[in-house]
């Protein structure tokens, strides 16, 4: 996926650390409705994709519940892209590769980065239509000058975060993390 198993393991570990830091920040802030303390109420996940040794760390998504009013507070995530079953890094990278390949016609590949072509096509529609219509993107794209080419998302956005694959991917996932939750208002990271 990135370049060798060592780089992949390091990337997945870094993403897990970032998620943990985001979760601590949300928990420390308390309930956004009543200010009450937040208790852990994690979601179980069954992530798809070749995660290797990191698979165990991806079986739960951190979430909280207010002790007083029961309001759910799920922190933004760089490991999970909303409710998609594949982890965020695989969604982004397979989408970038899928955009580069012609996924129609005779003799097309059956899989992209270990993901069925049909799924990658669905993700490309997500990036082209759903993502570009989100309130997040309407606000966040104003931080990008010159504008990224929306028809080439997510590759055009990934390129904005540098040439180093793992670092650029980590930066991009951190930047788009607000789209991964609706229960917590996450700030857009302005450092592109």
Image (cartoon, grey):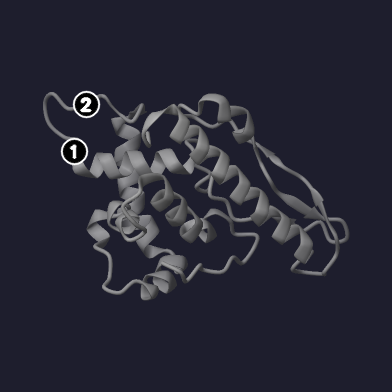
Crowdedness near tag 2: few (<14), some (14–19) or many (≥20) residues, C-alpha within 10 Å:
some
- On the image, the x and y values in percent for residue 122 come to 34, 41
Write down the residue under mark 1. 101
Query: Residue at image x 31%, y 48%?
Result: 125
Marks 1/2: CA distance? Answer: 9 Å
Residue 74 visible in image: no
**Residue bearing the label numbered 2:** 109
What residue is shown at x 43% (from left), y 64% (from top)?
Answer: 134
- Residue at figure coordinates x 33%, y 30% from the top left: 113
Q: Which badge, 1 or 2, comes first in the chain's sequence?
A: 1
Q: Most extreme residue toward the left, as rendered?
A: 106
Q: In the picture shown, does residue 174 fall above or below 145?
A: above
* Percent x, y of residue 177: 52, 57
147 shown above or below 118: below
Badge 1 vs badge 2, beta-carbon distance below 8 Å: yes
> SS at mark 2?
loop
How crowded is the residue under tag 1: few (<14 C-alpha within 10 Å), some, or many (20+)?
few
Q: Which mark is residue 11?
A: none
Residue 8 left/right relative to 102:
right
**Left or right side of 42 for 100:** left
């Amino acid at each position: 996926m990135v370049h060798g198993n060592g780089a992949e393991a390091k990337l997945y570990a870094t993403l897990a650390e970032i998620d943990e830091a985001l979760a601590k920040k949300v928990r420390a802030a308390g309930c956004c409705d009543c200010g009450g303390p937040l208790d852990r109420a994690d979601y179980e996940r069954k992530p798809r994709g070749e995660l290797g040794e990191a698979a165990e760390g991806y079986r739960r998504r951190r979430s909280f519940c207010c002790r007083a009013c029961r309001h759910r507070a799920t922190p933004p995530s760089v490991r999970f892209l909303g409710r998609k079953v594949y982890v965020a890094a695989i969604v982004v990278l397979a989408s970038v590769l899928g955009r580069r390949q012609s996924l129609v016609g005779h003799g097309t590949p059956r899989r992209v980065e270990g993901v069925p072509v049909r799924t990658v096509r669905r993700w490309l529609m997500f990036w082209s239509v759903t993502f570009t219509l989100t309130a997040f993107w309407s606000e966040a794209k104003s931080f990008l000058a010159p504008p990224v080419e929306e028809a080439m998302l997510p590759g055009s956005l990934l390129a904005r975060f540098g040439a180093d694959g793992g670092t650029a991917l980590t930066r991009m996932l951190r930047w788009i993390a607000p789209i991964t939750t609706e229960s917590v208002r996450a700030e857009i990271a302005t450092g592109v």
